[in-house]
Image (cartoon, rainbow, N blue to C red):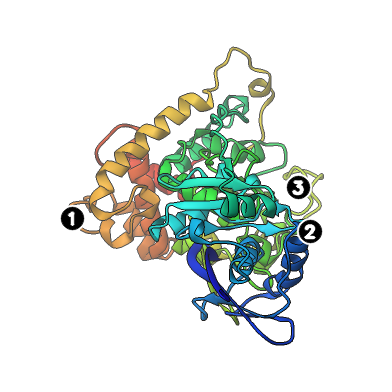
C-alpha cells in the first residue's frame, strides 16, 4: 500500500476545520513535498517527522513522498499536523494498519526524539471535530485535560510516537485523559478594600450590571486602579457557552492553566501603556493571533494611564467596542476573533498629576486639555460611564467597622440585575442592556415616555450629546432600574444616567 489518510484539524482564528492528511509514496528519488497551503512551520515538519520516526525505532521510507492537506484552499498553520503526518507516512509505507485510526482525529507536535508535545488551540480543534461528527481524538498528554472539556468526545493521549505506533500495531492502550480538577474558589481583590469613593463604587456597580464601558478620571492615589481591578470580582461567573469561548481563545494564545479546566471567571487584561496595535487587537505574521481585547472577551480590558497609550492603539479599539469582534485581514486570508469586552480607562488630569488649584501643578490649562485630548472624542463617545474620582479624605481612609460593601454583596445585586435584563431582552436575542440596539429602545413597548426623557432630548438637540450618547444614556437608565428592582426606568433614573455619562454625577 502506498497511500494513507489520517484526520487532523486546522484552525483559522477560533474556527476549526477538519483536515485530511494524505500521504502518497511512489518510486523515485527520495524527497518530501507538502501541498495544501502549508506555512513555514509545516514546511519544516518534514525534518521533524523524519527524525521522530527514525528515533522511535521505525524505518524511514526512502521513496518519493507527497503529502497533501485537504481541503487545499484552506491555509494550514502550526505544528499540530506533525503526528498525523508521521502516522500517515507509516501507514502509506505499509508499516501500520490504519484501521484503528478510521474517523479518529490525531493532533500533536513531534520532537526529534519522538516525543509528542502539546500544541496551542486544542480545545477549539476538538470542538470542531465534535461538530463534524467525529467523536474520537488522540492528543498530546499535555493537552488531554483541555480536550476532555468538550462533551461527547472520547479523548486518548500519547506522550511518544512509539506509544501511538504500539496502539495501532499491537492494541496497546493509550493514556487516559486525567479527571477534571475542581475549579478553585474565586478569589482576588475585594471591593470592600476601597476606601470611600461612593460615586466610583456606584459607577463600577452600574458598569458591571449592564455590561457598560467605564472611564475613571482623577488624581493619582484616588483609587481608580483599585476600582478597575475589582470590577471582575462582581461580575457573574461565565456560563458554559461563554466559558468555552473564553477558554478557546486562551488555548489559541497558549495562556491556559496547566490543568486545562474551563475558565469560569471573567478574564481581566491590563496591558502596559507601551502595548502596540497588534498587542491590543491581535496580529503577527502568518496566522494573526488574538490580542488583549480578544483575551479579555466576556471580561474586562483595563487601560491604566490611558492617555499614555499610542494614538493608533487607542483608535484601533473603536471598531471592536462597537461590533464586539476583531477582523484581521492579511494577504493570505482574514481572521476574526470575538472581542465583546468591558473597557475601563483610567487617566490622570494632567501629565504631572500633581494636585491642582495650588502651586504644585506645573501644567497650564492648555497642557491639561491636550493631555486628556489624547483620548479622542469618538473613543470617549463609546464609553457609557465617565466619572471623576475625587481624592480620598482622611476620615474615609481611616474609617473602620466594615461600612463598605464586599464584592459578594454587590455581585449578588449585579447578578439579579443581569437576570432581569436577560429575561426582558430574550425576545430580541440579547442578554445585557449594553448590547441592545438603539432602534429597539426607541420603539414601543420599550420607548420611554417623553416626560422622562425631556432633559435628554434637550441635550441631543443642543449638540452636547450625540445620537450614540443618547442611546447609551437610555441603556444606563435601564441598568439603574434593574439594580433598583423596577420594571422600567423613570425620570430620576434617566437623570442619574446623564450624570454618569457626562461626569456631572459627582
- Residues 468 and 12: in front is 12
Upstream in sequence: badge 3 or badge 2:
2
Upstream in sequence: badge 1 or badge 2:
2
Is 138 positioned to the left or the right of 455 in the image?
Answer: right
Task: Give the secondary structure at mark 2.
Answer: helix
Q: Which of marks 1 and 2 is in front?
A: 2
Q: Nearer the viewer, mark 3 or mark 2?
A: 2
Q: Name the residue under label 1.
A: 444
Instruction: Identify the residue shown where x is 27% and y is 34%.
Output: 486
- Residue 415 appears anywhere in the view: yes
**In the rendered view, would you say 123 is above or below 180?**
below
Upstream in sequence: badge 3 or badge 1:
3
- Residue 297 appears anywhere in the view: no
Task: Give the secondary structure at mark 3.
Answer: loop
Query: Residue 175, located in which quarter of the rendered image?
Result: top right
Q: Mark 2 points at which residue?
A: 55
Task: Give the secondary structure at mark 1.
Answer: loop
Q: Name the residue under label 3.
A: 353
**In the rendered view, would you say 300 is above or below 61?**
above
Amino acid at each position: 500500500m502506498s497511500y494513507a489518510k489520517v484526520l487532523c484539524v486546522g484552525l483559522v482564528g477560533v474556527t476549526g476545520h477538519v483536515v485530511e492528511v494524505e500521504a502518497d509514496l511512489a518510486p523515485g528519488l527520495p524527497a518530501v513535498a507538502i501541498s495544501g497551503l502549508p506555512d513555514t512551520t509545516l514546511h519544516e515538519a518534514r525534518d521533524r517527522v523524519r527524525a521522530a520516526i527514525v528515533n522511535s525505532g521505525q524505518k524511514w521510507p526512502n521513496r518519493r513522498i507527497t503529502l497533501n492537506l485537504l481541503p487545499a484552499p484552506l491555509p494550514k498553520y502550526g505544528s499540530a499536523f506533525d503526528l498525523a503526518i508521521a502516522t500517515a507516512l507509516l501507514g502509506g509505507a505499509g508499516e501500520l494498519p490504519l484501521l484503528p485510526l478510521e474517523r479518529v482525529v490525531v493532533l500533536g507536535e513531534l520532537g526529534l526524539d519522538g516525543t509528542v508535545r502539546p500544541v496551542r488551540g486544542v480545545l477549539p480543534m476538538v470542538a470542531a471535530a465534535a461538530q463534524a461528527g467525529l467523536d474520537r481524538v488522540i492528543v498530546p498528554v499535555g493537552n488531554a485535560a483541555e480536550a476532555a472539556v468538550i462533551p461527547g468526545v472520547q479523548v486518548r493521549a500519547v506522550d511518544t510516537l512509539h506509544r501511538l505506533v504500539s496502539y495501532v500495531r499491537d492494541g496497546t492502550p493509550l493514556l487516559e485523559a486525567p479527571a477534571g480538577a475542581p475549579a478553585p474558589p474565586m478569589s482576588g481583590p475585594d471591593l470592600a478594600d476601597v476606601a470611600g469613593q461612593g460615586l466610583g463604587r456606584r459607577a463600577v456597580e452600574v458598569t458591571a450590571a449592564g455590561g457598560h464601558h467605564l472611564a475613571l478620571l482623577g488624581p493619582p492615589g484616588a483609587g481608580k486602579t483599585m476600582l478597575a481591578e475589582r470590577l471582575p470580582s462582581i461580575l457573574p461567573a461565565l456560563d458554559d457557552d461563554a466559558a468555552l469561548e473564553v477558554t478557546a481563545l486562551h488555548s489559541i494564545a497558549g495562556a491556559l492553566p496547566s490543568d486545562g479546566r474551563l475558565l469560569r471567571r471573567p478574564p481581566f487584561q491590563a496591558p502596559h501603556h507601551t502595548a502596540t496595535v497588534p498587542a491590543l487587537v491581535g496580529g503577527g505574521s502568518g496566522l494573526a493571533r488574538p490580542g488583549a481585547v480578544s483575551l479579555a472577551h466576556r471580561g474586562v480590558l483595563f487601560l491604566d494611564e490611558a492617555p499614555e497609550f499610542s494614538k493608533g492603539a487607542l483608535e484601533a479599539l473603536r471598531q471592536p467596542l462597537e461590533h464586539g469582534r476583531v477582523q484581521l485581514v492579511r494577504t493570505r486570508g482574514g481572521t476574526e476573533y470575538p472581542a465583546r469586552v468591558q473597557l475601563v480607562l483610567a487617566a490622570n488630569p494632567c501629565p504631572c498629576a500633581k494636585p491642582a488649584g495650588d502651586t504644585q501643578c506645573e501644567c497650564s490649562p492648555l497642557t491639561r486639555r491636550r493631555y486628556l485630548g489624547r483620548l479622542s472624542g469618538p473613543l470617549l463617545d463609546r464609553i457609557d460611564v465617565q466619572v471623576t474620582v475625587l481624592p480620598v479624605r482622611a476620615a474615609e481612609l481611616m474609617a473602620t467597622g466594615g461600612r463598605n460593601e464586599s464584592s459578594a454583596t454587590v455581585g449578588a445585586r449585579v447578578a439579579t440585575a443581569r437576570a432581569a435584563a436577560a429575561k426582558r431582552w430574550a425576545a430580541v436575542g440579547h442578554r445585557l442592556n449594553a448590547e441592545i440596539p438603539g432602534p429597539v429602545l426607541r420603539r414601543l413597548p420599550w420607548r420611554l415616555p417623553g416626560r422622562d426623557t425631556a432633559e435628554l432630548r434637550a441635550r441631543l438637540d443642543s449638540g452636547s450629546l450625540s445620537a450614540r450618547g443618547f442611546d447609551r444614556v437610555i441603556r444606563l437608565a435601564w441598568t439603574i432600574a434593574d439594580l433598583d428592582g423596577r420594571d422600567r426606568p423613570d425620570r430620576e433614573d434617566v437623570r442619574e444616567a446623564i450624570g454618569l455619562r457626562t461626569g456631572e454625577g459627582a
